Image (cartoon, rainbow, N blue to C red):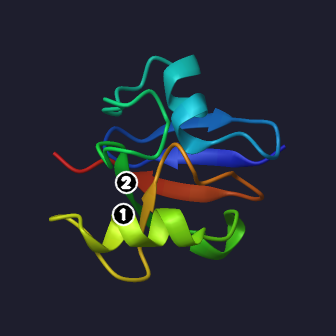
Amino acid sequence: MPKIVFTNDNTEVEVAEGTTILEAALENNIIINNDCDGNIICGSCLVWIDDGIDRLSPVSAEESELLLQMENYLPYRSRLACQARVQGDVNVAIPD
C-alpha cells in the first residue's frame, strides 16, 4: 500500500491506492482546509508535493485551471488534495 508522509509534522500514513490526499488527511486527523468539501471549486486544499508528484493521478483540465489562479501555486509541485489520487509513495507539505 502507498504511503503519504505529511512533512509538516512528519506524519506517515498508509493508504489504499486511489485514495485522495484529502481523504487520507481527514481519516488521520490531519488538517487540510477544504471549504468546498472536495468539489474542486475553492482551491483551499492546495498542497505542495515534496516528492512523488509522478506517483499521483494526472492533473485534470479543471484542476489545472484552478491551480493557476492560486496565490501559493508552485509549478510542478502544487496539487489540490481533493483531486490528487495516490498511486505510490508521496511526501506532502501543507501550506500555512
Q: Kindly indicate whether the residue at mark 1 contacts the one at mark 2 (C-beta within 8 angstroms).
A: no
Which part of the image, by quadrant, shows the C terminus? top left
Q: Which residue is mark 2?
A: 47
Disc 2 crowd, CA 10 A, few/some/many (<14, 14-19, 20+): many
Judging depth in this view, the residue of 4 and 33 nearest the camera is 33
Q: CA distance from mark 2 to mark 1?
A: 13 Å
Residue 34, image x, y percentages: 36, 32
Q: Quadrant of residue 76?
A: bottom left
Judging depth in this view, the residue of 58 and 51 nearest the camera is 58
Check disc 1 and give the amino acid type: Leu
Q: Which residue is mark 1?
A: 66
Check disc 2 and give the amino acid type: Val
Q: Is residue 89 depicted above or below 69 in this figure? A: above
Residue 49, image x, y percentages: 45, 64
Residue positioned 78% across, 46% down in the render = 18
Disc 1 crowd, CA 10 A, few/some/many (<14, 14-19, 20+): some
User: Dot 1: what SS?
Assistant: helix
Q: Which mark is residue 52?
A: none
Residue positioned 50% across, 22% down in the render = 26
Residue 72, image x, y percentages: 19, 64
